[in-house]
Image (cartoon, helix red, strand yellow):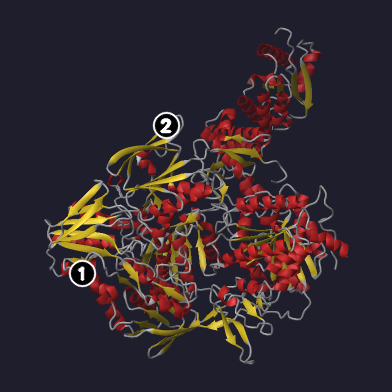
Amino acid sequence: MSTTTVQKTATKEGEDWQPLIITFCCNWCSYAGADLAGVSRLQMPTNFRVIRTMCSARVDPEFVLRAFSKGADGVLVLGCHPADCHYIGGNYRTRRRIALLRMLLEQYGFDPDRLKLEWVSASEGPKFQQTITDFVKEIKEIGPNPLKEDQVEEH
Amino acid sequence: MTNKVGAVMVVGGGISGVQAALDMADSGFKVYLVEKKASIGGTMAQLDKTFPTNDCSMCIMAPKLVAAGRHQNIELITNAEVEMIQGVPGDFMVTLKKNTLRVDEEKCTGCGECAIKCPIETSDEYNEGMKKRKAIYVMYPQAVPLVFCIDKNKCIGCGICHEECKAKAIVYDKKSEALEIPVGAVILCPGFEEFDARLKKEYGYGSYKNVVTSIEFERILSATGPFFGMVLRPSDGEVPKKVAFIQCVGSRDEKVGNTYCSSVCCMYAIKEAIIAGEHTEGLKPYIFFMDIRAVGKEFEDYRERAEKEYGITMYRGARVASVEEDPLTKNLTLRYSYEGESRSEDFDMVVLSVGLKPPEDADKLAKRLGIKLNKHGFCDTSIYDPLSTSRPGIFVSGAFAAPKDIPTSVAEASGVASKAGAIIAPARNTLVVKQSFPEEIAVEGQEPRIGVFVCHCGINIGGTVKVPKVVEYAKTLPSVVYAEENLYTCSSDAQERIKEKIKENNLNRVVVASCTPRTHEPLFQNTIKEAGLNTFLFEMANIRDQCSWIHMHEPEKATEKAKDLVRMAVAKSRLLEPLKTSRLEVNHAAVVIGGGLAGMTAALDIADQGFSVHLVEKTGHLGGYLAKLPLVEGGMKPKDHMDHLIKRIRESKNITVHLNNEVKDVTGFIGNFKVKLKDVELDAGTIIAATGGLEYKPTEYLYGQDPRVMTQLELEDKLAHKTFHGKNVVMIQCVGSRNEQVKYCSRICCAHAIKNAIEIKKQSPTTNVYVLHKDIRTYGFREDLYREAGQLGVNFLRFPEGTMPKLEKKGDNLEIVVPDVMLREDVLLKPDALVLSTGVRPNPDNVEIAKLMKVCGSKDGYFLEAHMKLRPVDFATEGIFLAGLAHWPKFIDEVIAQASGAAARAMTIISKDQLETEGIIAAVNDDVCNGCGICDPVCEYKAIVIVQDPSNPDKRKAVINEGLCKGCGACVAACPSGAMEQKGFKNDQMYAIIDAAFTGGK
Amino acid sequence: MSDFEPKVIVFLCNWCSYAGADLAGVSRYQYPTNIRTVRVMCSTRVSPHIVLELLKDGADGVIVTGCHPGDCHYINGNYYTEKRMDLAQRLLKMTGMEPERLKLDWVSASEGEKFSHLIQEFVTKLKEIGPNPVSKDKKLVTRLEAAVDASKYFRLKVLTGKDINLTSKGNVYGETLKLESLDEIMAKATEDEYRNSLILQLTNHKAYSVKELATEIGEPTDKTLEHVVSLRAKNMLALDHIEGTTPKYKAITIGGA
């Protein structure tokens, strides 16, 4: 398939290494919070790509694993604050799933801090900015996704 | 029959007006929603959080605002005021003055470039003057409609905005216009204003910087407020350590002329105190109040948590005499009386809990519209007809009729929709728009042919992201057969272009890379639908709000990111499928469970609009508790009102009453319920649960053992029959409420006790009456009763929280010992009549009924509504509603308003011939599903059932009820076998978009 | 300080003042040697930030000369010059530098004598005031930098640029604004932008509290907080950390957080 030059993710560890972070946002709170960050022109690093789901509970653990296996350096799941869920209690399930998934990642020797769950409401543009900025920093400290190196070798 | 106009005008775009508009529009009426300001939203849009759930106000409100803004049967008329209403109910002519925005509402895209460039800064009313806005502005970022307007008073006419506006939307000489609109009914929801705290000179508001009002504090707490949600002192930007909240500023205060209680201040102060502590480390809140009026659902728990969990200090029964500022430190000294002594204490900041007052122009509005105001200046209503103004055909809801909280305003808004609908029911569906679309092009089996439209958004995107590069890149992506750039992809000429390009290129998928789907997806979906494509063949890439605007200084990286986002959207788009929303036939009848005030009111409201109703009552007669209220209230005996209702029900040809009957089973779903009674099975499109509550029968205080001990209802009966002869009467409040077993406040007992106390004094002025209480909770205009009782010589003794008066029988004498807070000693009383203000208990039947209807109960045993703030009469299960004491203890007027609300909500369903299911819902792959049932408990909407597979006796499988599914996708993520799918967000679509986020993704 | 020889930059418009200066020479009018002239086509070319920057960099004085009102070769250029120099003068006053160091005057092609007098008087005046204090006063430099930044703001440029239209020809509504009311708006805007710029200059390298900023910018703390709010809303300033009960802010450097 034709894929012209895109950004250089995952070269080697080096000064210009830029992590790529997949951010799942629930439609009702966090996606709106991300929009508000935009409306308020809050500046932040470009290292993340937002994928919208209707509810954070739609984020199948497999989505997270898929993202990691494709080379995501970090995955951020954002949902409504507890009790604010548009779908009543979806985010409680998200919380349990992500907690479990982090344990699982750890058992497989994968740094669980690459996966993070945060609550961002529709009025929390600044919190969205903060969350992204902090997470990018954290992931930069952790370094590139080790699976990516493996992949490069495989191919 | 005279000619009825199938349209209604809602005046005021706050939460109440918006809800009324939505309910009317959903019931087949055309709605004109008139708002004085440039955007709808009202006061709620300014709030940070809402009590008692601490929900984010904007999060829960914005979807309603957007829904109102988009509704094809709601026409928003902003910046407009009503001048005159002529005509008769059913056939009014309303004259409006629409003030000019000086911006073409059709052309403005809300991009905001004009405001960035405008050189004039002025204070921002939305942030209570604590931030700045420009002379061309939009009230708040999420405003609906998102149209900028020019503040002519501030504008110097430099012309910059016109030069900057790429959409050419600025029209300086646009004129204000007078509009004449025919409607059948008018609903007034102009809301309220805050009390002007400057009038309480002793608190120093206006001269002391660190004294702020509660609404200012609300903005301070907001993430979009001046301090990004952190509490700071306006005098010097320091974090305050001690913050005092002073209650009743402009309420319960004869000196300033407002004798009523503003009802909401206690709760909002507790909320603000909690949030302030949460947002700001080390901040300690203190609340100074007379009585804490936590009367609503789960408010008392909230109050308790505030004290115990959040460490908020409460000074009960404290009235603050004055606030003084230290001119150097700007700290504030409060002087107040507490438990009988004068004290003073220093604080870093003071919040004045300002009361609610009628809108400033209420007088003029009333005169222009020919409606009466009450003595407090609010709209005059009667307790038996709480939603009607004095002029037939004009209704009122929300805080214009009395200070009230959001859920009550919302319930009333629905209620008023029911009342207005009754007038124009014959003209239903006569003025609503039905858009017609061409036949859908079948795309199944075709190779995807994607068209990509990339928006410059003036310079909002194009100024940072190199749009032409993104377009060139898009052309290289698989399945993309066409790509172009637009100055504004959302403009109306661009819609025509998109349609043309679909035809020209045989496009079967469309991707727009522009702003956010939250506001713009429906517009583009509509466009492709007009071109014959299924609306679900559309995908958006958000390259403005989530790219160009947040990476303004990194154009290269932003451009790369925009390309990625387009690639991701295209990847998903390739796998999109047309979704069929199915249509469900709707049964037009309603079942109302419970024949008390709520049930009868709801049944009559529905019958009045021509639908048939089954009213199911467990006992052998209608009426419920009304029969037990023989004293005159609001100019009439509640019992007479009951007789009137029963008579109307008997005469109504639409209502079938099922006495001595009960619900045995409920099956089906919204639009198609089957309700099984003892003897008959009823078909209904909707159900209302109005099962009422019970009076608590006390076991304490020798009740039932000594004839001198009675409940308030029993006392009322005696008073009505003039058979009460006590000379020393003691009333004890909170018997069976606010204790360890039942923590909640029963809301109605204080006013009920005082009503009886006044009656005693009227019948026998020499009788001594003592009311022993923790707080007197006569909220709203009921405060007048409290005052009246005090003037008649009724004695009020406050005892501390956590204690109760003790009763002893000495010989034949009753002796009450009560710890008096003011005197700080025990007081001995020897009553010859002891009246217990017993609380309300939930109907024990609720448990069983909840199970049958698959709805939830609250922790206190009442029914649990879908959302405490904004869906106060809905159950989470679609199509089922609640009203009256089954929801929470409440007064007659509140029951009536809420019952009408439930009726209106029910009619939004049964007024339709068909219901359209959501497109994005769950779907089961039968071949893969093994019926494990893991998905079932995950579903909050009870939309999943596990059934026996009819074709295979060994197999069970999950079945989705399309009428109930809301499409959250929680079950899909839970499904261990991959059998569950979410249409529009299918697993393969999600994997495609995830994969495409990476280099080399397809 | 009799041996102090001020350095003065003189801007001359090509059509009047430059010719006036030439005429002074032709007529052998004598004046001090302290000036260095810069020719511009029209006096309006001299942006406020240019003169402010010169003073920041150590020039002891700056003179801008142009054609007399009504005589401008480019019709109205000198009217704008006047507005722009008003802005520069306003900003200069706010920094605390002697406003006499900047002068605007009109010199026609026939006013050789006037030109020589202008220079003589200006140099004498500067000798009285003494040398430009920037070399000894670091804070003044920061304030001048803030003034330079402020003078470049779009908002002030718009107000300066639209001034004449608004007060004489009428605005987009066909109304003419009173000179005083526009002046008031201009004064307020200049003050706001200057203070904002100064806050940004200060917080560029170090986090400041509202109280500290208030002392630096010479405003009460509540007004200073308003500036902080406005800068935060524009995403130019951010909370850095909190010391006890005192939040401290730093400027956001361009390039994102």
> What secondary structure is found at the residue carrying circle 1?
helix
Q: Is residue B234 left or right of residue B696?
A: right
Label 2 marks a residue whose chain is B
Q: Within 10 angstroms of label 2, few (less than 14), some, or many (20 or more) residues?
A: few
Q: CA distance from mark 2 to mark 1?
A: 56 Å
Where is residue C62? Give x, y as percent: 71, 21
Label 1 marks a residue whose chain is B
- Asked if C173 appears above or below C122 in the picture, the reply is below
Query: Label 2, on which residue?
Result: B326
- Asked if B73 appears above or below C192 in the picture, the reply is below
Q: Amino acid at mark 2?
A: Asp
- Asked if B678 appears above or below A108 in the picture, the reply is below
Query: Label 1, on which residue?
Result: B714
Give the residue drawn at x 59%, y 52%. Answer: B171
Where is residue B559? Give x, y as percent: 77, 54
Give the residue drawn at x 25%, y 51%. Answer: B819
Q: Quadrant of residue A59?
A: bottom right
- Asked if B710 appears above or below A19 in the picture, the reply is below
Q: Is residue B951 left or right of residue B273?
A: right
Closest to the observer: C135 or B628?
A: B628
